[in-house]
Amino acid sequence: MDFSLKKIVIFVLVGLLVGLLLLGGIGYLIVNTFTAQPQKANENIAVINVSGPIVSGGSSSFLGEVQANANEIMRQINRAKEDDTVKAILLKVNTPGGSSAASDAIYRELKKFKKSGKPIVVSMGDVAASGGYYVSAIADTIYANPATITGSIGVIMQFQNLEELYNKIGVRPVTFKSGPYKDMGSPSRDLTEEEKEILQNMIDRIYEEFVDVVVEGRGMSKEKVKEIANGRIYTGKKAKELGLVDKLGTFYDARDKTAKLAGIEGKPNLIYYNQSSPLKRLLSSVTQLITYTIFEENVKSNLKLNSNTKQELYKKLLIEQQNNYLQDLQLQY
């Protein structure tokens, strides 16, 4: 009875909270819809967010972690390029990096935008490291806060070798493959020396591409870039001293600079292309609350499992990881 009553109380409280939040959100949206003024003017600056880990596609944030969806960001860059009323892009970067391929795709679209003659200015947030710096390097001007974490110029690929753990719990994967390298990176075995060399060569080639991007974007010599492109992170203040950042300032400083480069007089009009709606942020918060509550209850319930049941669940988890290891087989900035 105690368990049932506790569950009922928790879900009733969560339900009431969800209902109140939804009613408040709907009310806000109704008021905002009828009172909001038209946002577009003859001369606009497109504000595009690159927030969260950079990924090639998938969900951007609706039910989980905020991600920088490269496909969506590329569409927004093209939209800004083709819109004659958009005179510049102000890129808000707040990401630790992510997929090398996704970062490069965003960079290439920004490069095309820049060739149209429209300027790009970057405003770095808390973190603009690795892939976050990769997409920033093309900008005409880069702003950072003195405490921004940036740099981390380099490439990484990681694997887990769970062979000994598999042996201890009795998991013995059986692999059939068409070639000697088809299961390279599998957690059920260690990499061979030849495989390590193959992967290191891949890392080195992609690293050189990263260095070239910084050389081109920042107008620095390759030797100078390689001195600081050792994977180390820098504060915004240090990055400015090294030439990785142009100015220290806020988003509004970056906004004013963007307007100046674009030849816009007076206070510039900003169009936020991928800013989350109030309802989306509301639902995301509610979802996180419900997920945490349910997870907490499940953890408490699972603590009562006997050791045999726990071992079976652990085996299933490891087998699933074994089956999905290719999802982690990607280069990361």
Image: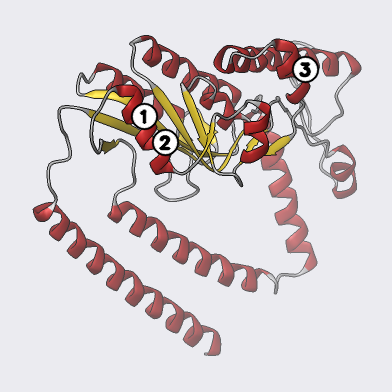
Q: Amino acid at mark 3?
A: Leu
The amino acid pointed to by label 2 is Ala
Q: Which mark is residue 117?
A: none
Q: Secondary structure at mark 2?
A: helix
- Say which of marks 1 and 3 sits in front: 1
84 sits to left or right of 69: left
Residue at mark 1 = 258
Q: Residue at x 70, y 25 (%)?
A: 155
Between 64 and 208, the one lying in front of the other is 208
Q: Are marks 2 and 1 in contact (CB under 8 Å)?
A: yes
Find the distance from the CA under tag 2 to the CA under tag 3.
39 Å
Left or right of residue 81: residue 104: right
Instruction: List x then y, in percent, for residue 32.
Output: 16, 56
Q: Is residue 322 above or below residue 118?
A: below
In terms of sequence position, does the residue under pointer 1 or pointer 3 come before the other? Answer: 3
Q: Which residue is mark 3?
A: 199
The numbered disc on residue 254 is: 2
Work out whether residue 252 or residue 286 is closer to the camera in this orientation and state it: 252
The percent coordinates of residue 104 (x first, y second) are: 54, 19
Residue 32 vs residue 57: left or right?
A: left
Q: Relative to 315, does residue 241 appear above or below in the rendering?
A: above
